[in-house]
Image (cartoon, coloured by chain):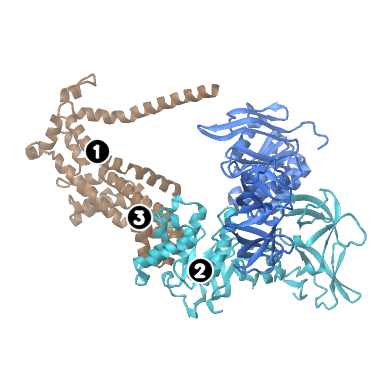
């Protein structure tokens, strides 16, 4: 009896903790969403307003800016363009990362190396590119891109984003391939299939969910990148992350529009994550167990 | 043994263990006498490990009582129960050497270093791991780690020793060897041991009493030989003994003489003793016979009716052979000392040892009767 | 019987470890050859070399007198089962079994109707025809093992390679599957190479046993040869549960007879015994060949021991006893002996059950039984 009461009290505390954490985490996002529907007065007033009259003005301005882009000061705002840029760069960037990374991950799993430590060393070196501080390479990067005329170009950004995508895809796909027992591939070889055929009929179907999850995460990471876009991006290729800077102009900070831009920018990531959520958890924990 | 003061019997009274809605242990009542080696035997999920953990104090007892000696231990912490535990998964301390791991509980109790040195060396040598005394557990194989864990458990001087699958990770040869070592140690120490295992050979070899469990319920508690000869139900009968017992479904029928009639064969029961208060002609029963309790002949009997069967496969085993036979629609395994090879499809003739026939109720699985068994139980 | 597979002086190392160190043997059509040895002996590596999953450092592999060292796995007429079954988790049982028949290398040989017919036939043989639509994750261990077996049987290769196929099944199932496999192999008449660490399995199934240890063959022979005339201590000890007892002994000549003296007991080996009497020997005697004589009843000559433990295992009893020097021996009996721990008894055995091994080289010198030559 006493045990039951103790357990129930336990549960109350747990729920309390969960709710508090949820509020803490979600509040900034919900506030931002609310900002996007507020008029400037409501946004900047001294006492924050929870109940207000919503307006769609901010969103209207975001999408109609194109017409004013050449007339307002030095920073021009072209949100739809930025959104499209993000889509192009992150989309193709992810695709390229997958095309390069997945086979590399497979090679690092099944390939025969002279020393077994070589395999781990290569994998870890690749991973370290991902951890590496972006700041460290900025100067040579700038010079290189200038020289080769890659500034403000889609190709330039997509190539650069591979530093974000490829190590991650290699690392994740490696762990998925490691989860496939070698004996299944051996069995396929003995059934009469070549290694290439074995890869497509055995390995690929088994890692599909994991690769899908990895693709979504890669897309998100590339979408979120700021520094690279800032350094080698330009007027034409600016994605939403750097484009958002434009909301901070000399005259005012366009909070409402910025909030709206944030909401819209976040939407693709959120939608993708929800779609792939089931696979993500499986995919991430597989990687964690194997490591 | 004689000079000991404490009496360390373990009494389990109507113990239940529930994990949420799952009933892991259902109303278990069981005694382990002082100095006895009790094995808790059953397949995984039968509740044996939960029971051991409740005796140890690592799990809460949902309801019921457990006594060690004359103390009710339900609310006592493990360290207050004067027990020693050998886990299935070792739980060794990596930074300490093997020697230090085993010495740990003794040092904690405050023994002098000479005594510690002596006791630890002795037990390490008994278990054959003296050479590993300075190694770190991390460098040892699973089996070696398990032996270290065993040493650490047995080096203490307590009332009750609790062992959970303590030799399961050793390879077969070593396991057989360790059975004798453990049994010998128990005899020397004279202490109470409660031993959890899923391996019936281990339980049979070492235990004074075996408690067979299935789905949280106690099936039978008895000496190894009694459990082997007189299982109380189908589960126990099938679980103990290798090769496993043969089960034949059929009816007792009167056709001049009494027969057990299966699908496509019949067995003459007239030489045995049937108690018709327990076994009714016309009713269906499951007949249980161990492979060693059936004799095989290549010619039909002269003055007795032998049962005809066909050889399915013959497997030699050095000093005996295992023959799988087709008996009507059923398959039967027998063990025979005769090592002459038999080709598949050969016709053979079987004599069933009528002293050992065991009947089980086909619905409840309970043992109904054993022919020739002059005992007071079912 | 035709020779199907021959392996000559096969060697394979992984780094510094010599997994397979000069192995030579051959297998005939319709014969079951069992490679028996403890874990790490090189059994699986040998199998993988035959299958083409590993390349040998030295040595040749012949299939039907053709050397196949350079052929990739899919060109060798071998089918293999793996210890972990290696079923394709994303395919149904049917597709798993059909897999070898659908390989592009073979696609011309089998039409889809052929495939269906063969798969269903094989499934019926293994009693899994009702499970063809299920996925491996929905099957029990025994069922999975049968699917793996089915996938091997479905082609008609020249050699079946089986790697510990029943090691992970529970005891009852293991017995059943062992019997079924023996029956199936008997009917199919292909050469079988079967790997196991369980000597009872080897004795039950094999026409020929190849005992392997640390990558080297210890003995090749029939089950009778290997069990009754082991060539060295390892083979003698590995085939037996409990393992053979080994006692220090010496050879003496007395009155024209040669005796082996062990723990004060003299065992006569006969007159015409050609042994170097100066060598130190070990006397090997199986637990099942020993018996207990109670007390000191007169004429019974044997070894004096003290009973330590008695293990009742149902259909046999294992008695552990200690010699005066502290050495432990085991005796296997069919019925409970009328002794108790602590009793002093005499243990006897027949000269015809005695094996002698050189104490230094561990090679066999003498076996009792029909012939008394080692």
In the rendered image of the structure, the colour used to display chain C is: cyan
Query: Badge 3 is on which residue?
Result: A205
In the rendered image of the structure, the colour used to display chain A is: brown
Is there CB contact under 8 Å for labels 2 and 1? no
Query: Badge 2 is on which residue?
Result: C160
Give the residue drawn at x 65%, y 65%.
B348
Q: Residues within 10 Å of mark 2 (few under 14, many from 20)?
A: many
In the rendered image of the structure, the colour used to display chain B is: blue
C48 above or below B131?
below
Residue C228: image location, x then y, percent: 71, 69
Query: Badge 1 is on which residue?
Result: A266
Same-chain check, marks 2 and 3: no
Residue C13: image location, x then y, percent: 53, 68
Please report, as a chain letter, where disc 3 is located.
Answer: A
Report whether residue B241 is seen.
yes
Q: Where is the N terminus of chain C found, in terms of image quarters?
A: bottom right
Q: Residue furthest top?
A: A47
């Amino acid at each position: 009896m006493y045990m039951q009461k103790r357990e129930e009290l336990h549960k109350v505390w747990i729920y309390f903790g969960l709710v508090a954490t949820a509020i803490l985490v979600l509040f900034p996002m919900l506030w931002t969403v609310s900002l996007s529907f507020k008029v400037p007065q409501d946004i900047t007033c001294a006492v924050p307003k929870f109940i207000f009259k919503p307006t769609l003005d901010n969103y209207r301005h975001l999408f109609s800016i194109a017409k004013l882009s050449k007339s307002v000061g030095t920073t021009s705002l072209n949100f739809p363009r930025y959104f499209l840029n993000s889509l192009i760069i992150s989309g193709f960037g992810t695709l390229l990362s997958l095309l390069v990374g997945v086979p590399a991950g497979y090679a690092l799993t099944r390939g025969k190396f002279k020393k077994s430590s070589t395999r781990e060393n290569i994998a870890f070196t690749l991973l370290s590119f991902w951890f590496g501080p972006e700041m460290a390479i900025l100067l040579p990067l700038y010079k290189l891109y200038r020289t080769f005329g890659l500034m403000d170009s889609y190709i330039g950004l997509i190539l650069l984003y591979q530093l974000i995508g490829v190590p991650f895809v290699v690392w994740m796909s490696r762990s998925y391939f490691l989860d496939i027992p070698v004996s299944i591939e051996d069995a396929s070889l003995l059934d009469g299939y070549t290694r290439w055929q074995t890869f497509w009929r055995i390995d690929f179907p088994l890692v599909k969910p994991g690769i899908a999850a990895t693709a979504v995460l890669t897309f998100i990471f590339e979408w979120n990148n700021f520094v690279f876009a800032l350094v080698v991006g330009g007027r034409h290729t600016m994605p939403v992350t750097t484009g958002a800077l434009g909301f901070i102009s000399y005259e005012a900070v366009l909070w409402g529009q910025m909030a709206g831009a944030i909401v819209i920018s976040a939407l693709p990531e959120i939608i993708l994550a929800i779609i792939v959520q089931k696979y993500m958890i499986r995919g991430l924990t597989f990687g964690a167990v194997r490591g | 043994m004689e000079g000991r003061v404490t009496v360390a019997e373990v009494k389990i009274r109507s113990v239940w263990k529930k994990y949420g809605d799952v009933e892991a242990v259902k109303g278990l009542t069981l005694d382990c006498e002082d100095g006895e080696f009790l094995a808790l035997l059953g397949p995984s999920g039968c509740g044996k490990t939960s029971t051991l953990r409740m005796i140890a104090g690592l799990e809460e007892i949902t309801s019921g009582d457990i006594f060690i000696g004359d103390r009710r231990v339900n609310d006592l912490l493990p360290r207050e129960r004067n027990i020693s535990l050998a886990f299935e998964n070792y739980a060794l301390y990596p930074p300490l050497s093997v020697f230090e791991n085993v010495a740990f509980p003794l040092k904690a109790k405050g023994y002098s270093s000479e005594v510690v040195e002596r006791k630890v060396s002795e037990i390490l040598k008994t278990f054959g791991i003296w050479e590993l005394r300075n190694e770190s557990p991390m460098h040892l194989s699973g089996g070696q780690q398990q032996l270290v864990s065993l040493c650490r458990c047995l080096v203490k001087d307590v009332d009750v020793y609790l062992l959970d699958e303590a030799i399961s990770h050793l390879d077969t040869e070593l396991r057989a060897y360790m059975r004798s070592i453990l049994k010998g140690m128990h005899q020397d120490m004279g202490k109470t041991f409660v031993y959890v295992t899923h391996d019936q050979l281990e339980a049979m070899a070492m235990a004074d009493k075996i408690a067979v469990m299935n789905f949280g319920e106690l099936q039978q508690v008895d000496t190894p030989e009694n459990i082997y000869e007189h299982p109380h139900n189908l589960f126990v009968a099938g679980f103990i003994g290798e090769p496993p017992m043969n089960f034949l479904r059929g009816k007792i029928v009167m056709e001049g003489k009494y027969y057990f009639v299966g699908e496509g064969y019949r067995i003459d029961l007239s030489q045995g003793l049937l108690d018709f208060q327990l076994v009714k002609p016309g009713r269906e029963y499951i007949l249980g016979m161990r492979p060693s309790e059936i004799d095989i002949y290549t010619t039909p009997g002269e003055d007795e009716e032998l049962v005809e069967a066909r050889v399915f496969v013959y497997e030699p085993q050095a000093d005996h052979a295992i023959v799988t036979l087709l008996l009507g629609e059923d398959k039967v395994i027998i063990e025979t000392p005769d090592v002459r090879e038999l080709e598949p499809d050969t016709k053979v003739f079987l004599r069933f040892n009528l002293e050992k026939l065991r009947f089980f109720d086909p619905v409840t699985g309970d043992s109904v009767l054993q022919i020739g068994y002059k005992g007071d139980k079912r | 019987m035709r020779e199907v597979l021959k392996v000559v002086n096969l060697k394979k190392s992984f780094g510094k470890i010599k997994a397979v160190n000069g192995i030579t043997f051959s297998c005939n059509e319709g014969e079951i050859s069992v490679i028996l040895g403890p874990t790490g002996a090189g059994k699986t590596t040998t199998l993988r070399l035959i299958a083409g999953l590993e390349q040998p450092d030295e040595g040749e592999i012949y299939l039907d007198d053709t050397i196949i060292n350079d052929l990739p796995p899919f060109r060798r007429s071998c089918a293999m089962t793996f210890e972990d079954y290696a079923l394709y988790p994303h395919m149904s049982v049917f597709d798993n079994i059909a897999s070898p028949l659908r390989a592009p290398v073979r696609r011309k040989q089998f039409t889809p109707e052929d495939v269906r017919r063969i798969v269903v036939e094989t499934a019926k043989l293994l009693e899994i025809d009702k499970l063809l639509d299920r996925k491996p994750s929905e099957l029990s261990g025994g069922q999975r093992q049968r699917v793996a077996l089915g996938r091997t049987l479905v082609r008609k290769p020249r050699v079946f390679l089986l790697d510990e196929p029943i090691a992970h099944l529970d005891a009852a199932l293991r017995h059943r599957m062992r019997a079924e496999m023996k029956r199936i192999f008997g009917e199919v008449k292909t050469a079988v190479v079967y790997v196991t660490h369980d000597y009872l399995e080897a004795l039950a199934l094999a026409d020929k046993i190849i005992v392997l240890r640390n990558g080297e063959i210890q003995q090749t022979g029939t089950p009778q040869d290997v069990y009754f005339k082991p060539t060295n201590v390892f083979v003698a000890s590995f085939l037996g549960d409990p393992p053979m007892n080994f006692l220090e002994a010496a050879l003496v000549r007395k009155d024209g007879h040669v005796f082996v003296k062990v723990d004060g007991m003299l065992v006569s080996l006969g007159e015409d015994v050609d042994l170097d009497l100066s060598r130190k020997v070990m006397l090997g005697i199986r637990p099942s060949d020993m018996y207990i004589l109670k007390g000191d009843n007169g004429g019974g000559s044997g070894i004096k021991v003290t009973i330590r433990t008695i293990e009742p295992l149902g259909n046999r009893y294992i008695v552990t006893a200690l010699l005066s020097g502290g050495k432990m021996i085991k005796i296997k009996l069919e019925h409970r002996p009328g002794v108790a721990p602590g009793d002093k008894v005499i243990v006897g055995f027949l000269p015809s059950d005695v094996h002698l091994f050189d104490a230094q080289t561990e090679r066999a010198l003498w076996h009792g039984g029909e012939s008394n030559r080692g």
